[in-house]
Image (cartoon, rainbow, N blue to C red):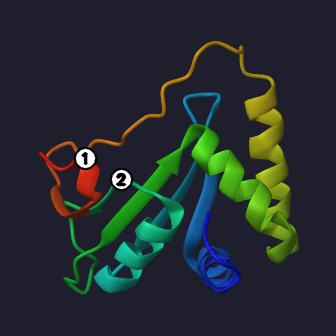
């Protein structure tokens, strides 16, 4: 896990720019989309994400958009870690994500490695590089 300074930094970033959600009915995730590649890479490293991709379509101002995402138990762990540092709206979303995840049928779970669907990978965790 990250140090206190990194946890506080990622909490502030995700409060303003992050998205906490549930994908495919039960799979929690934390996403970050930004035009600042260096910031998204730093966030990915702190969160333990596997990669950062450049979206296929740029912003309306023609700036590239970079994305990182974590799923499953890794996302839940971060949600629990960040909960007390988040605002009321984000705390409510985190509670919903955790409750939905708790209702999930328990079976062995393999941490999902997000794929890029042909998008350009701009950073990838060292042990996942090919």
Where is residue 27 shown, x and y percent of the image? 59, 34
Q: Is residue 28 visible?
A: no
Q: Would residue 25 be visible to someone looking at this image?
A: yes
Instruction: From this view, report whether residue 54 is shown above or below residue 129.
Output: below
Q: Which residue is denoted by mark 1 in the rendering?
A: 128
- Is residue 25 shown above or below 21? above
> Could you say which disc has been placed on residue 21 in the image?
none
Q: Taking 100 as reference, is 48 left or right?
A: left
Nearer the observer, 28 or 128: 128
- Label 2, on which residue? 50
Q: Residue at x 62, y 81 (%)?
A: 16
Residue displayed at 32% across by 84% down: 38
Front in this rendered view, residue 78 or 12: 78
Q: Nearer the viewer, mark 1 or mark 2?
A: 1
Gap in angstroms between the C-alphas marked 1 and 2: 7 Å
Q: Quadrant of the N terminus?
A: bottom right
Horizontal and vertical percent for residue 11? 68, 77
In the image: residue 37, left or right of residue 68: left
**Quadrant hosting residue 108:** top right
What is the secondary structure assignment of the residue under circle 2?
A: loop
Percent coordinates x, y for residue 105 in the rendering: 71, 14
Task: Work out whether mark 1 precedes mark 2 in sequence or the reverse, and give the earlier one.
Answer: 2
Q: Nearer the viewer, residue 75 or 16?
A: 75
Do the residues under discs 1 and 2 have CB atoms within 8 angstroms? yes
Query: How would you rate the neighbour count of disc 1 (Cα within 10 Å): few for under 14, some for 14-19, many for 20 or more?
Result: few
Badge count: 2
Q: Position of residue 36 (x, y in %)?
A: 34, 85
**SS at badge 1:** helix
Image quadrant occupied by the C terminus: top left
User: What residue do we see at 43% from left, 34% from top?
Assistant: 112
């Amino acid at each position: 896990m990250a140090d206190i300074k990194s946890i506080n930094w990622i909490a502030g970033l995700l409060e303003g720019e992050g998205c906490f959600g549930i994908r495919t009915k039960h799979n929690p995730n934390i996403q970050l989309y930004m035009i600042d590649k260096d910031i998204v890479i730093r966030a990915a490293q702190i969160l333990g994400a596997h990669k950062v991709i450049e979206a296929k379509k740029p912003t309306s101002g023609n700036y590239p958009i970079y994305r990182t995402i974590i799923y499953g138990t890794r996302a839940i762990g971060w949600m629990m870690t960040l909960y007390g540092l988040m605002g009321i709206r984000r705390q409510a979303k985190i509670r919903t994500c955790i409750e939905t995840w708790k209702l999930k049928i328990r079976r062995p779970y393999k941490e999902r490695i997000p794929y890029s669907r042909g998008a350009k990978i701009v950073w990838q965790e060292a042990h996942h590089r090919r």
